[in-house]
Amino acid sequence: MSDKPLTGTRIKLTKVEYTDVDRVYLAINELFDVRIIRTDEGIVIDVFPYSELVEVDEPVATTYAFDQEVMTEEDYEALDFESYPIG
């Protein structure tokens, strides 16, 4: 996939793993590459120096968010993860 600028932003969608629907890659201002990964428990975001998707060994920053952190406990417990829409 070629870079696709997101309308009205300085962000480009740079790579989609068609074999892995739980990942997306973004280039931001040609300063950062960002990888967002959907996991069974939430999301993980890794930030790399901009390298046109030649990933370096270690991200310069990593953060995460759990599904439970953005849902009420009752809503989280009611989820059917087998049919949970991801992607």
Image (tube, grey):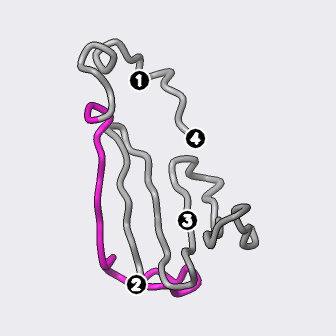
Measured from the top left, where is residue 78 in percent x and y? 34, 12
Is residue 14 among what the camera can see? Answer: no
Residue 81 lies, with reference to residue 62, above or below; the image says above
Q: Nearer the viewer, mark 2 or mark 3?
A: 3
Measured from the top left, where is residue 22 in percent x and y? 51, 48
Upstream in sequence: badge 2 or badge 3: 3
Measured from the top left, where is residue 34 in percent x and y? 47, 69
Amino acid tagged 4: Gly
Seen at 43% across and 46% down, the residue is: 38
The residue singled out by tag 3 in the image is: 25
The residue singled out by tag 1 in the image is: 81
Amino acid tagged 3: Tyr
Seen at 55% across and 58% down, the residue is: 24
* Alpha carbon separation for disc pair 2 and 3: 14 Å
Frontmost residue, 58 versus 72: 72
- Tell me, for residue 87, which label it has, or none: 4
- The span shown in magenta is 49-69
* Alpha carbon separation for disc pair 1 and 2: 32 Å
Of helix, strand and loop, which one carries label 4?
loop
| Image quadrant in which you'd find residue 68 | top left
Frontmost residue, 17 versus 78: 78
The residue singled out by tag 2 in the image is: 56
Residue 21 lies, with reference to residue 33, above or below; the image says above
Upstream in sequence: badge 1 or badge 3: 3
* Alpha carbon separation for disc pair 4 and 1: 13 Å
Of helix, strand and loop, which one carries label 3?
strand
Amino acid tagged 2: Val
